[in-house]
């Protein structure tokens, strides 16, 4: 089976983190979102994954060397919209395929999604998830037989017919590609799905799996902490520091003997934690990070190569790759430290 991941968006709301790395390459508990998704696709037997890129497409090139699944990058010279991107990247597909939004973190059972689609026998199946405010999403009411009644993208607040929304995971028959006009931008949510719903060939599969659109700083931090806590059933790399401590450390981590590490926490490869520093609870520290003496880091995410000065105190903070926090700084919830000006740290992922 083939799969397509839509990774063309600019991730504007995640700036400045996305000035150096496109959103799908941002790490979630030290493994990039796209690496996590590739592993899940390989697990359900996908043999080819196409990355539909636009913004910073060259940043995805290193993924082509993966062995367990063939990864191909398809570039748009200008954004084609979600539908145009599917039509362009999946052209020539002659069998059923998966489509995944590139900014949705979920552990939905893809095997179940694929087999449900086969049972529905429609032209496409959309995974649905409940949310509190459906107005920011594609709203998808279904009948008793899971058939989609209508597809309403981003309805005005208070007008949504249901709180079940498009979760950004689809199984698609190749015939759907004929519905997508070429040569212009097409929104799958505003053009293609509404037409399919009107014809009764679109199905919705309600899921209660973990689901999060990590498009903002707050949800990106949440995604990392949910992975640490196990709310998102995804692996955290490294070995357990001590039994039951919920602290995972990767290769080559050096922790000063009097540093205090409180789980849940994860520390990436090659990181050093200075004397009397305190990490956690709820801290994701990337690879090759330097934590100065006496620094305190809790409820925060430090991307690879970050440098935290001595006695700095961080609570609820995101530090971009290679970003620097001066000694003695005190940063509170909502603070985002931009990536450093040095070489871009592409998360190594999956070890
Ligand atoms: N290649 C390519 N080209 N990818 C694109 C383009 C494009 O022109 N535009 C968007 N994408 C990618 C984004 O990178 C993202 O992974 C995905 O398509 C969805 O686009 P967003 O811009 O994130 O859309 P949204 O979050 O407002 O809404 C979508 O996702 C919701 C779930 O999070 C819709 O599919 C909604 O219906 C859905 O509920
Ligand atoms: Mg989105």
Image (tube, rainbow, N blue to C red):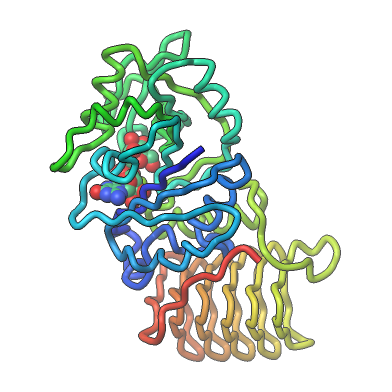
* Residue 233 in view of the camera: yes
Q: Along the horizontal axis of the image, is 201 left or right of 182?
A: right
Furthest residue in direction top, as rendered: 144
Q: Nearer the viewer, residue 277 or 66?
A: 66
Q: Along the horizontal axis of the image, is 301 left or right of 134?
A: right
Query: In which quadrant of the rendered view does residue 286 lie?
Result: bottom right
The residue located at (71%, 82%) in the rendering is: 252
Furthest residue in direction left, as rendered: 184
The residue located at (48%, 69%) in the rendering is: 317
- The image shows residue 321, relative to residue 247, as above or below, that is below
- The image shows residue 107, relative to residue 243, as above or below, that is above
Q: Along the horizontal axis of the image, is 258 left or right of 47?
A: right
Q: Position of residue 117 (x, y in %)?
A: 50, 22
Q: Position of residue 311 (x, y in %)?
A: 57, 88
Q: Position of residue 228 (x, y in %)?
A: 64, 57
Q: Nearer the viewer, residue 21 or 329?
A: 21
The residue located at (40%, 26%) in the rendering is: 173
Count of all numbered marks drawn on residues in the image: 0
* Residue 137 in view of the camera: no
Query: In which quadrant of the rendered view does residue 197 lie?
Result: top left
Q: Position of residue 18 (x, y in %)?
A: 35, 66
Q: Nearer the viewer, residue 72 or 246?
A: 72
The residue located at (58%, 86%) in the rendering is: 290
Quadrant location of the C terminus in the rendered image: bottom right
């Amino acid at each position: 089976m083939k799969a397509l991941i839509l990774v063309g968006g600019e991730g504007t709301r995640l700036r400045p983190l996305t000035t150096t790395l496109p959103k799908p390459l941002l790490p979630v508990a030290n493994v990039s979102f796209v690496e996590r998704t590739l592993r899940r696709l390989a697990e359900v037997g996908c043999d080819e994954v196409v990355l539909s890129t636009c913004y910073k497409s060259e940043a995805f090139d290193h993924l082509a060397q993966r062995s367990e699944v063939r990864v191909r990058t398809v570039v748009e010279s200008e954004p084609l919209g979600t539908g145009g991107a599917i039509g362009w990247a999946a052209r020539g597909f002659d069998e059923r395929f998966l489509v995944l939004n590139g900014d949705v973190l979920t552990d939905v059972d893809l095997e179940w999604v694929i087999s449900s689609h086969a049972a529905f026998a429609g032209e496409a199946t959309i995974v649905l998830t409940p949310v509190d405010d459906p107005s920011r999403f594609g709203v998808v009411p279904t009948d008793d037989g899971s058939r989609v009644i209508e597809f309403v993208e981003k309805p005005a607040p208070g007008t949504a017919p249901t709180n079940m929304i498009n979760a950004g995971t689809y199984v698609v028959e190749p015939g759907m590609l004929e519905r997508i006009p070429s040569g212009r931008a097409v929104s799958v949510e505003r053009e293609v799905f509404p037409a399919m719903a009107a014809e009764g060939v679109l199905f919705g599969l309600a899921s209660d799996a973990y689901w999060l659109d990590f498009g903002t700083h707050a949800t990106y931090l949440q995604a990392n902490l949910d992975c640490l806590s196990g709310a998102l059933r995804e692996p955290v790399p490294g070995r357990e520091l001590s039994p039951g401590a919920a602290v995972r450390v990767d290769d080559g981590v050096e922790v000063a003997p009097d540093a205090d590490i409180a789980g849940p926490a994860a520390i990436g490869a090659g990181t050093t934690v200075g004397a009397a520093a305190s990490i956690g609870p709820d801290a994701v520290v990337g690879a090759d990070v330097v934590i100065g003496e006496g620094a305190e880091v809790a409820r925060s995410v430090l991307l690879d190569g970050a440098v935290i000065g001595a006695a700095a105190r961080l609570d609820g903070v995101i530090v971009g790759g290679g970003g620097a926090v001066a000694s003695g700084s005190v940063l509170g919830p909502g603070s985002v430290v931009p990536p450093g000006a040095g070489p871009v740290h592409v998360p190594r992922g999956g070890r």
